[in-house]
């Protein structure tokens, strides 16, 4: 049996790591629009450098397994889907992974348009529980 993660595990782990990193950024004093912009950039960096995007074998798996395999065409159009005479698997995988991560963040109740509100709600919840 392989130790390799499944694609859904990759998406969940990426979303959880992004939330943890955003919590650290929030705890360091970044809030509001600055936190939203930081988070958006961090999602881009996570997807762009992810091994499941940069390695063709994994990129093909994303395209085959993601419910958002059409995300590249929907977001960027069909130009660029073929590169150097072959399917641009990494481009397609990037867009699908990004869409899947955003869906997972939403499923976890994380508002990417207002990350501060997520952490403020957590703090209020912790305060109410402690009382």
Image (spheres, rainbow, N blue to C red):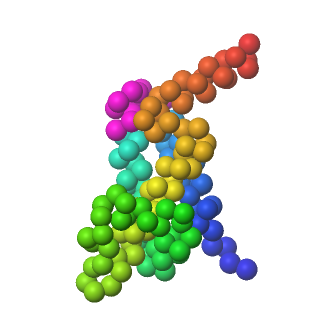
From the viewer's perspective, tell me whether residue 41 is left or right of residue 26: left
Residue 128 quadrant: top right
Front residue (pair 129, 8): 8
Quadrant (top left/top right/bottom left/bottom right) for the N terminus:
bottom right
Residue 34 quadrant: top left
From the viewer's perspective, tell me whether residue 16 is left or right of residue 96: right
Q: Which residue is drawn at 43% across and 79% down?
A: 56
Whether residue 1 appears in magenta in the rendering, the answer is no
Furthest toward the bottom, the residue is 85
Give residue 122's position: percent from left, percent from top: 61, 27
Count numbered badges in the picture: 0
Q: Which residue is drawn at 68% across and 78% down?
A: 2
From the viewer's perspective, tell me whether residue 49 is left or right of residue 4: left
What's the magenta region?
A: 25-37
Quadrant (top left/top right/bottom left/bottom right) for the C terminus:
top right
Residue 93 showing in the rendered view: yes
Q: Vertically, is 125 above or below 76? A: above
Whether residue 34 appears in magenta in the rendering, the answer is yes
Furthest toward the top, the residue is 131
Residue 86 quadrant: bottom left
Give residue 10's position: percent from left, percent from top: 57, 61
From the viewer's perspective, tell me whether residue 95 is left or right of residue 9: left
Majority SS type along the magenta span: helix
Q: Residue at x 40, y 69 (%)?
A: 92
Give residue 20's position: percent from left, percent from top: 54, 42
Give residue 66's position: percent from left, percent from top: 54, 66
């Amino acid at each position: 049996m392989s130790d390799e993660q499944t694609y859904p595990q990759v998406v969940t782990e990426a979303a959880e790591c992004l939330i943890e990193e955003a919590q650290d950024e929030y705890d360091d004093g970044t809030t509001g629009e600055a936190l939203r912009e930081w988070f958006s950039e961090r999602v881009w960096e996570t997807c762009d450098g992810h091994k499941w995007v940069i390695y063709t074998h994994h990129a093909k798996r994303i395209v085959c397994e993601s419910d958002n395999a059409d995300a590249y065409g929907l977001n960027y159009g069909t130009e660029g889907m073929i590169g150097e005479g072959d399917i641009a698997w990494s481009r397609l995988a990037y867009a699908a992974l990004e869409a899947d991560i955003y869906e997972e963040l939403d499923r976890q109740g994380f508002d990417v348009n207002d990350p501060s509100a997520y952490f403020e709600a957590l703090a209020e919840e912790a305060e109410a529980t402690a009382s």
